[in-house]
Image: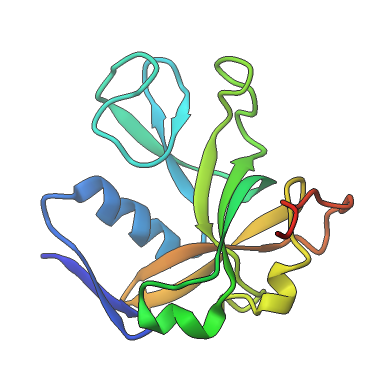
Amino acid sequence: MPLEGEYLGMSVAIPDLDQPNQEFYSHCGQGIMHLQSCVKCALLRYPTTTACPWCAEAAYVWIPVSGKGTLYSYGEVHHAIQPVFQQFSPYLILLVELDEQRDIPNRYDGLRINGNLADATGELATPELAATVGIGSRLRIVFKPIGDGMAIPLWTVDTEAEQEVPWRYPDN
């Protein structure tokens, strides 16, 4: 049975054939970030895949991770293609490097997860909040429920972490 939900008024459906993503979003629905861990080399991976990108082993187990990391890169969207996102413009699409597995298996091969910036309640960030975040910001996962037992992971500022002045792309 497909997992179905709704996010910002848009339908979300994960079909039965996509079992790894159903499992991923179900874990998110429980409020804890889980990632696939290869049973052969023990490296974590994201997004979900059918085989380890490092050793090609198909078998994996789900393990919980901290859901904390550092903003590695970002894109700032000023023209939202989906009408529902226009009210949040400009908004950020983030690439966050998790604390787990940084620079593993090689330098610059850290474990990175994408997502939008949100406030602590899981609502998409206001432009004012988005303007305070940049490369180097410390972030943590927050989950936005979107259906029965399913949630979308978003990123919010980690208020418990020491924050350095973030680097931001210059305005034109």
In depth, the one of 25 and 80 nearer the eye is: 80
Looking at the image, residue 40 lies above or below residue 126? above
In-image side of 133 versus 50 (left or right): right
Looking at the image, residue 119 lies above or below residue 135? below
Please state, as top left, top right, bottom left or bottom right, where the C terminus lies in the image.
bottom right
The residue that appears at 74% across and 54% down in the rendered structure is 134
How many numbered circles does the render carry?
0
The residue that appears at 29% across and 80% down in the rendered structure is 10
**In the rendered image, which quarter is residue 147 located in?**
bottom left
In-image side of 14 versus 122 (left or right): left
**In the rendered image, which quarter is residue 89 located in?**
bottom right
Query: Is there any visible trace of residue 131 in the rendered image?
Result: yes
Looking at the image, residue 99 lies above or below residue 135? above
**Extreme front residue here?**
172
In depth, the one of 39 and 144 nearer the eye is: 144
Query: Is there any visible trace of residue 66 in the rendered image?
Result: no
Q: Position of residue 81 (x, y in %)?
A: 37, 72
Q: Position of residue 42 (x, y in %)?
A: 46, 22
Q: Position of residue 75 (x, y in %)?
A: 56, 54
The residue that appears at 29% across and 35% down in the rendered structure is 49
Looking at the image, residue 76 lies above or below residue 66? below
Please state, as top left, top right, bottom left or bottom right, where the N terminus lies in the image.
bottom left
The residue that appears at 69% across and 69% down in the rendered structure is 130
